[in-house]
Image (tube, helix red, strand yellow):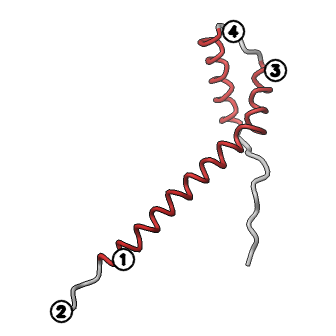
Amino acid sequence: MRKRQSLSQIKLSDAQKEKLKDEMKAFYLDVRGEELGMIEQMQLLELFEQHMAPVIYNKALDDAKKWFGRMMDNLDSDYYELYKNES
């Protein structure tokens, strides 16, 4: 059996990084009235990728596992709903 590879770090595409940098820049301007420079954008993005994204990713995995568990519980009851009365 092949061992699964673990994700060591969340990697974003260049397009995703640009979109997030634009969002951060707009947020700082709208909420704080401050311009966010390129260096600050990169630092915030690195902070997100290295420290915040794994927490959010793991939470999403936990939520998906709970959902899948509920679906599997439903599968058992749905299976017996298909039984025909043998009388």
- Looking at the picture, tell me which residue is in the foreground, 35 or 72: 72
The residue wearing badge 2 is 87
Tell me the amino acid under the disc marked 2. Ser
Q: Residue at x 66, y 35 (%)?
A: 15
Q: Which residue is mark 3?
A: 39
* Residue type at numbered disc 4: Glu
User: Distance of mark 3 from mark 1, alpha carbons?
Assistant: 57 Å
Tell me the SS state at disc 2: loop
For label 4, the residue is 34
Foreground mark, 3 or 1?
A: 1
Q: Which residue is mark 1?
A: 79
Q: Residue at x 66, y 36 (%)?
A: 16
Q: Secondary structure at mark 4?
A: loop
Camera-side mark, 1 or 4: 1
The CA distance from mark 2 to mark 4 is 76 Å
Residue 78 figure quarter: bottom left
Decide: marks 2, 1 in contact (CB < 8 A)?
no
Q: State yes or no: discs 1 and 4 in contact (Cβ < 8 Å).
A: no
The reply, left or right, for residue 52 in relation to residue 65 is right
Q: Which of the marked residues, 2 or 4, is nearer the chain's N terminus? A: 4
Question: Mark 1 belongs to which amino acid?
Answer: Tyr
Where residue 75 appears, as percent x and y from the top left, is 41, 71
Q: Amino acid at mark 3?
A: Ile
Chain-order first, disc 3 or disc 1: 3
Q: Which quadrant is the C terminus positioned in?
A: bottom left
* Residue 83 vertical placement versus 65 (above, below): below
The image quadrant of residue 65 is bottom right
Q: Residue furthest bottom?
A: 87
